[in-house]
Amino acid sequence: MELYTDTYYIGRILAGDTACFRCLLDRYSRPVFSLIVKIVRNREDAEELTQDVFVKAFRHLASFKGESSFSSWLYRIAYNTAISATRKTRHEFLAIEETLLNNVSEEEVSEMLGRTGRSEQLQRLDDALAALPADERALILLFYMQEKTVEEVAAISGLTPTNVKVKLHRIRKKLYVLLKGMEEE
């Protein structure tokens, strides 16, 4: 089957050919699930939330204005759905003192986070990500793993691009502090 643009499928769906939604589902279900599972950290919940995202997208497709890409619009629904789900389940997150973060240089952060060759280091990074609040984890995942631009992350999260940059900078420092603590244990 020949692949068409998201806009083509959206037009067909809105014209009554709802079977075309399957094409969008096929195109985006895996990356949306991947994002959600990394935010909520539970596979079963992520499967259910992914279904919720696509139901919401289908029901509100007529409200898609095309001001951003369809994928950004869909990721925003996924982001909001996952963050809302994590707020319902209270988790305790490690509080990191502001002064500790301010004393960390960007060079130290880059050097620490740049070590990705060892599976042990990747496991530590995954553990450090798990210690972050869901909204911070989501920003890191969107930017680094989903390779979204700062502008796309801003559109998805509802933050300004400047705020996204500041938050990413601070979250990287938090990850550094967490990883440094894990190395010292």
Image (tube, helix red, strand yellow):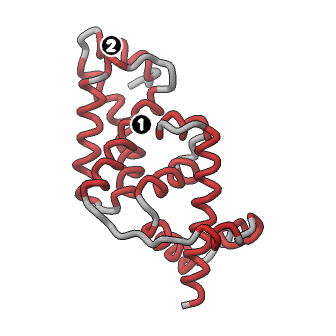
- Residue count near mark 2 (Cα–Cα under 10 Å), binned few <14, some 14–19, many ≥20: some
Q: Residue 51 at what x, y percent from top left?
A: 24, 42
Question: Looking at numbered disc 1 in the image, what kind of residue is underneath it?
Answer: Arg
Residue shown at the point (58%, 52%) measured from the top left: 167
Horizontal side of residue 134 vs 46, given as left or right: right
- Residue 133, by quadrant, is bottom left
Q: Quadrant of the N terminus?
A: top left
**36 up-or-down from 148: above or below:** below
Question: Is the residue under label 1 in contact with that under label 2 (CB below 8 Å)?
Answer: no
Q: Secondary structure at mark 1?
A: helix
- The foreground one among 11 and 150 is 150
Residue occupied by mark 1: 76
Hey, what amino acid is under mark 2? Arg
Q: Secondary structure at mark 2?
A: helix
Earlier in the chain: of badge 2 and badge 1, it is 2
Give residue 12's mark: 2
Picture residue at 32% right of the left edge, 34% below the top: 25
72 sits to left or right of 45: right
For mark 1, does the 10 Å Cα neighbourhood hold few (<14), some (14 to 19), or many (20 or more) residues? many
State the image quarter where residue 12 is shown: top left
Q: Give the left or right position of residue 119, taking residue 107 as reference.
A: left
Decide: is 156 above or below 93: above
Residue 112 position within the rendered picture, expressed as x and y whole percent measured from the top left: 68, 73
In the image, farthest residue toward the right: 107
Residue depicted at x 34% and y 62%: 41
Residue at figure coordinates x 27%, y 26% from the top left? 58
Q: CA distance from mark 2 to mark 1?
A: 22 Å
